[in-house]
């Protein structure tokens, strides 16, 4: 609700994606006088060191960043429960998670009979972040909506050569052609 007032009072606006710029212009309306809007995408993360990274067995699926309902963690747990035990990957939530959320999600995992396949790292420093990403088989980031943000964690995983599964609306606008297969937003 304050976006238009803040932008009108600004000398310039910086956003992190072309999608965020489009959403901002839509919020302001077609007749709005706007200051310059600059898109400054996330900086590229360091590329994976040369040479193969050994992946763990069983496979490890990562959910990166702040653990939040907006990232559909229950859906990830329910999908994990659908995979037969002998073929089930591990699911690791890499990033900050409030203790009550961790207990709530572990309780849901226990109800599904998959608690031994689910883990949480909590907050990690930069070195632990990259190490965790390097140990993943793939990253899954599902979102129930967007504010136009461009996910740094998705970029980090891609920079390290880890496949990413996402329904993040507008993510393809920021990536080179052929680097992604789009899924519907409501996947």
Image (cartoon, grey):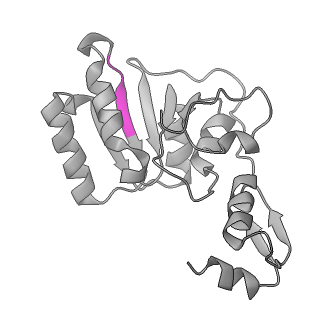
Q: Quadrant of residue 14?
A: bottom right
Residue 150 appears at what percent x and percent y?
A: 64, 52
Location of the N terminus (image quadrant)? bottom right
Disc tally is 0
Q: What residue is at 74 percent from the left and 88 percent from the top?
A: 9
Q: Residue furthest left?
A: 111
Observer able to see residue 91:
yes
Residue 8 appears at what percent x and percent y?
A: 75, 84
Q: Seen in the image, is 111 located left or right of residue 72?
A: left
Observer able to see residue 136:
no
Camera-nearest residue between 7 and 82 = 7
Residue 19 appears at what percent x and percent y?
A: 70, 53
Start-end of magenta stretch: 88-92
Looking at the image, residue 154 lies above or below residue 52? below
Residue 66 appears at what percent x and percent y?
A: 44, 55
Q: Is residue 48 magenta?
A: no
Looking at the image, residue 60 lies above or below residue 149? above
Q: Residue furthest right?
A: 36
């Amino acid at each position: 609700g304050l976006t238009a007032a803040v932008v009108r009072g600004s000398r310039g606006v910086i956003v992190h994606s072309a999608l965020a710029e489009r959403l901002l212009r839509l919020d302001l309306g077609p007749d709005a006088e706007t200051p310059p809007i600059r898109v400054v995408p996330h900086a590229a993360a360091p590329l994976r060191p040369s040479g193969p990274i050994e992946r763990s067995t069983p496979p490890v699926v990562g959910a990166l960043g702040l653990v939040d309902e907006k990232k559909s963690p229950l859906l990830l747990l329910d999908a994990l429960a659908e995979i037969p035990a002998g073929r089930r990957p591990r699911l690791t939530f890499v990033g900050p998670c409030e203790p009550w959320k961790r207990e709530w999600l572990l309780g849901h995992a226990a109800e599904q009979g998959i608690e031994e396949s689910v883990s949480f790292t909590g907050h990690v420093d930069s070195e632990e972040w990259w190490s965790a990403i390097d140990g993943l088989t793939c990253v899954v980031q599902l979102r129930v909506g967007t504010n136009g943000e461009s996910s740094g964690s998705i970029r980090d995983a891609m920079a390290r050569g880890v496949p990413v599964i996402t329904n993040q609306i507008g993510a393809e606008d920021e990536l080179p052609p052929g680097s992604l297969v789009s899924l519907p937003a409501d996947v």
